[in-house]
Amino acid sequence: MNTLDFEPLDPDEFGFRGFRLLIDGQYIYSVPGCTFGELSYWEFADDLGLEDESVSSQKIHRVVGVCDCGFAGCGATWARVEKHDGIVTFSEFSGFQNPQESPTLTFDRENYEAVIARMRILTAKYQQLDARSKGEAE
Ligand SMILES: [Zn+2]
């Protein structure tokens, strides 16, 4: 069983707020071949964002990292995220340069849901902060 966690991004590092997923305490980018590891809060939508038609129409892959400009349309790492009763699996990392080496990661479903819940709370806070700083600029 793997462990999922995240750390908030330092907004000074990329110019946007968001997250960095951690797998077993390691930055997800350290998984071999993972192309993008930072996740902007706007690509997170109550859960890891689902793929759109530009990825595939299956709606089973979710974005786990995006280009350092923050937009998944520019470049992203997608993973097939499957939710079962007790577990959640991540596989088929689309950003892997060598798909044969793409591992299947298995998380306790409670671990996954707790991480997503904490990311939801931060996302709401980031939306407010950005809305407020836009208001101040006008
Ligand atoms: Zn970009």
Image (cartoon, rainbow, N blue to C red):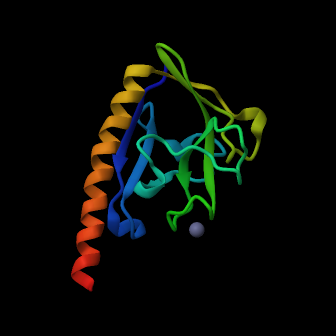
Front-lying residue, 12 or 137: 137
The quarter holding residue 101 reads top right
For residue 130, side relative to residue 86 (left or right): left
Front-lying residue, 19 or 59: 59
The quarter holding residue 104 reads top right
Residue at image point 73% right, 45% down = 56
Tell me where residue 78 appears, x and y as whole percent.
62, 44
Q: Is residue 32 above or below residue 134?
A: above
Ligand 1, image quadrant it occupies: bottom right
For residue 134, side relative to residue 53 (left or right): left
Front-lying residue, 13 or 54: 54
Front-lying residue, 90 or 99: 90
Tell me where residue 102 appears, x and y as whole percent.
69, 34
The quarter holding residue 46 reads top left
Tell me where residue 40 appears, x and y as whole percent.
44, 57
Residue at image point 29% right, 58% down = 126
Q: Is residue 44 above or below residue 22?
A: below
Q: Is residue 63 above or below residue 80?
A: below
Tell me where residue 70 appears, x and y as whole percent.
50, 63
Of the 4 image quadrants, the one containing the C terminus is bottom left
Residue at image point 56% right, 46% down = 63
